[in-house]
Amino acid sequence: MRSVIPDYLTEALGDVEPDTSGEPAGYIPELAAADPERLGAVFATVDGEVYGAGDIDTEFTIQSISKPFTYALALADRGFDPVLAKVGVEPSGEAFNQISLESDTGRPLNPMINAGAITAHSLAGSEDMNPAERVERVVHGLSAFAGRRLKIDEAVCASEMEHAHRNLAIAHMLRSHSILTEDPRAVVDGYTRQCSVLVTARDLAMMAATLANRGVNPLSGEQVIREPVVRQVLSVMFTCGMYDAAGDWATQVGIPAKSGVAGGLIGALPGQIGIATFSPRLDPHGNSVRGVSLFERFSSDMGLHVM
Ligand code: DON
């Protein structure tokens, strides 16, 4: 029997297509030049079925969607206690690039904001790795979630580094509190490389499906991370993944999720499905306008809210 899902996805994309509100991220020329009309959505089930419509094989940079996966790698590589000692799990209710450190310890509130994500990057891999080895650990790990070897967009990365003053300031603050123990510039460079990994909506859906499938990539069968790590990551995505829109998202959509400034958006429903959308125009929180609309619709049409 032919699946009705592709028709459903095509119809959903058609319904959000007229919405041209928001703007692609404008802080670097490479992102500002993104084709704002790109639009795609993919469902990847835990048993390996993949359904998509629209621009599902167009590459764009993963940006902040790398954060939950790198947090997972840090937890897997270092263990819970050393990571929790340096990055909290409390929603900040602030924008992704706010400093949001605990006043007494300097510990970033959570791993989804930049301060926490920069710290999580420094905790991926083993302590004795040099910066290039750490980046390779992260790219290798993100690739295992996606089920194919991913690569870095060097042009986006170089441009991001030229505009990384705020992330550098955050990293220096973290170094002053000894949350970072390495050269802040090298850590920001590694974090920026991590954000510049190229993915498609299809890749993102597989990465989300790997989280939904208890850490096992549904197509490759590889156990990328263990279940306790998956639970930790999905919990933090649920409470912090959409930054200062996290409460609205939790009540209205109710799916653990993460957005990125290049227009990607993922959701992972444990035991069921990974979902990814791609549309570059962003709302004031830095979340994809059409992506948010699509997720609201998917959640309501299919009863995906976890409550
Ligand atoms: O750290 C930054 O500024 C970017 N490279 C990533 C930010 C991002 O994707 C925020 N999410 N919506």
Image (spheres, grey):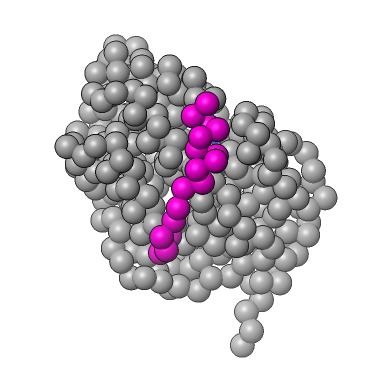
Please give the name of the residue rendered at 54% of the width and 62% of the height, measured from the top-left corner: 202
Residue at the extreme bottom of the image, as rendered: 1
Q: Is residue 300 above or below residue 134?
A: below
Quadrant of the rendering where the N terminus is positioned: bottom right
User: Total marks drawn?
Assistant: 0
Please give the name of the residue rendered at 54% of the width and 25% of the height, measured from the top-left corner: 163
Can you give x and y, in whole percent of width and height, for residue 70 in the image?
36, 43
In this orientation, does residue 248 appear?
Answer: no
Can you give x and y, in whole percent of width and height, for residue 11 in the image?
75, 64
Residue 158 inside the magenta-drawn segment: yes
Q: Is residue 122 left or right of residue 161?
A: left
Which secondary structure class fits the magenta region best? Answer: helix
Q: Quadrant of residue 143?
A: bottom left
Please give the name of the residue rendered at 73% of the width and 45% of the height, measured from the top-left corner: 36
Q: Quadrant of residue 134?
A: top left
Q: Which residues are magenta?
A: 145-162
Residue 149 inside the magenta-drawn segment: yes
Judging depth in this view, the residue of 200 and 16 nearest the camera is: 200
Judging depth in this view, the residue of 177 and 226 nearest the camera is: 177
Please give the name of the residue rendered at 55% of the width and 39% of the height, measured from the top-left corner: 156
Q: Quadrant of residue 261?
A: top right
In this orientation, does residue 176 appear?
Answer: yes
Judging depth in this view, the residue of 148 and 294 nearest the camera is: 148
